[in-house]
Image (spheres, rainbow, N blue to C red):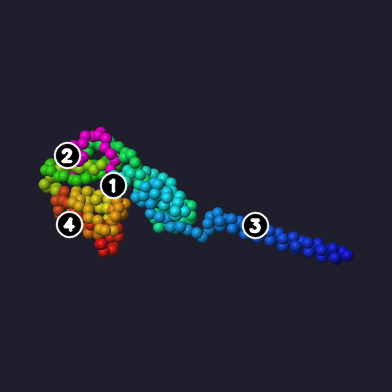
Amino acid sequence: MAKKDSLKKGGWIIRNLILGVVFVLAIIAAASIFLSIRTRHGKEVTVPDFTNLSLRDARATAFAADLRVQILDSVYMRRVPRGAVVSQIPKPGSSVKPGRKIALTVNSIVPKKVSMPNLIHTSLRQAQAELSSRGLVLGRLNYVSDIATNNVLRQTYRGVDVPPGKDLYSGSTIDLTLGLNGSDAMTYVPNLHGYKYLNAVNALHDHSLNVTALVFDKSVRTYSDSLAASVYSQRPAATGYPTVMGTGVTLYLKLDAEKPAE
């Protein structure tokens, strides 16, 4: 009798252990299914390119791709439509989980105003740094005979002298008239192959040279494309021979500088 009771007790313990294991496995399976549904395990979507879209169109595009968008920051760029998307994180083509938030930087609807600095009697390098810090763009370098080379003599906006303290829209282009001493009037044309658009322009200004023209091939269709485009050719070429300051250089750009131009 005692033996039977012992067997019954042992069987009850085994059954309960089995039931316990089954219960734990069921909980794990249910949690796994829940997490898989919750996180859409194994599913990914490709991030669309939102650049140049209005915020409304960006939201519609995100909804269609099972994503969400949020404005991270705003800037002001004159050549980009106001309110349009300028950049995004993650980048277009990235693989992300459905429902992911895409951070957007949009072009400000109301352009920011900045105060014109006093660049008179500063050096070209100082003027470049000051304009950049104010959100203004360095334009043409006009050289005239003077005792000091690269000494700023005039600052103009649209051909008119602009006084210090005048309010201008961010992104406005400022032309400079600089001194040129005949004994210190030469520079060199740098090799700009592979330089991005803005970096190439800055490099020319660093060498006291002007941009005669920017020629973009068919791969460049938007302003955002132009910012990403690289130099694949230039005229004049970088020969290593000296040239006069203020000389103009034509740049030829495309999105992939290693591929043949279209």
* Residue type, mark 4 in image: Pro
Q: CA distance from mark 1 to mark 4?
A: 28 Å
**Residue 158 within the magenta-colored segment of the rendering:** yes
Residue bearing mark 4? 236
Please name whichever residue, 157 or 239, is drawn nearer the observer in this view of the structure.
Answer: 157
64 sits to left or right of 114: right
Marks 3, 4: nearer the viewer = 3
In the image, which residues are magenta? 150-171
Mark 1: few/some/many CA within 10 Å (<14, 14-19, 20+) = few
- In primary-sequence order, the first of circles 3 and 4 is 3
On residue 27, which mark appears? 3
Write the residue at 15% across / 57% down.
241
- In primary-sequence order, the first of circles 3 and 1 is 3
Q: CA distance from mark 2 to mark 4?
A: 28 Å
**Residue 261 within the magenta-colored segment of the rendering:** no
Q: Quadrant of the C terminus?
A: bottom left
Residue bearing mark 2? 153
* Residue type, mark 3 in image: Ile
The picture places residue 124, in percent across and down from the top left corner, at: 21, 44
258 sits to left or right of 97: left
- In primary-sequence order, the first of circles 3 and 2 is 3
Please name whichever residue, 201 or 62, is drawn nearer the observer in this view of the structure.
Answer: 62
Asked if residue 125 shows in the view, the reply is no
* Residue type, mark 1 in image: Arg
Marks 2, 4: nearer the viewer = 4
The reply to whether dot 1 and dot 2 touch (C-beta < 8 Å) is no
Write the residue at 27% across / 35% down.
167
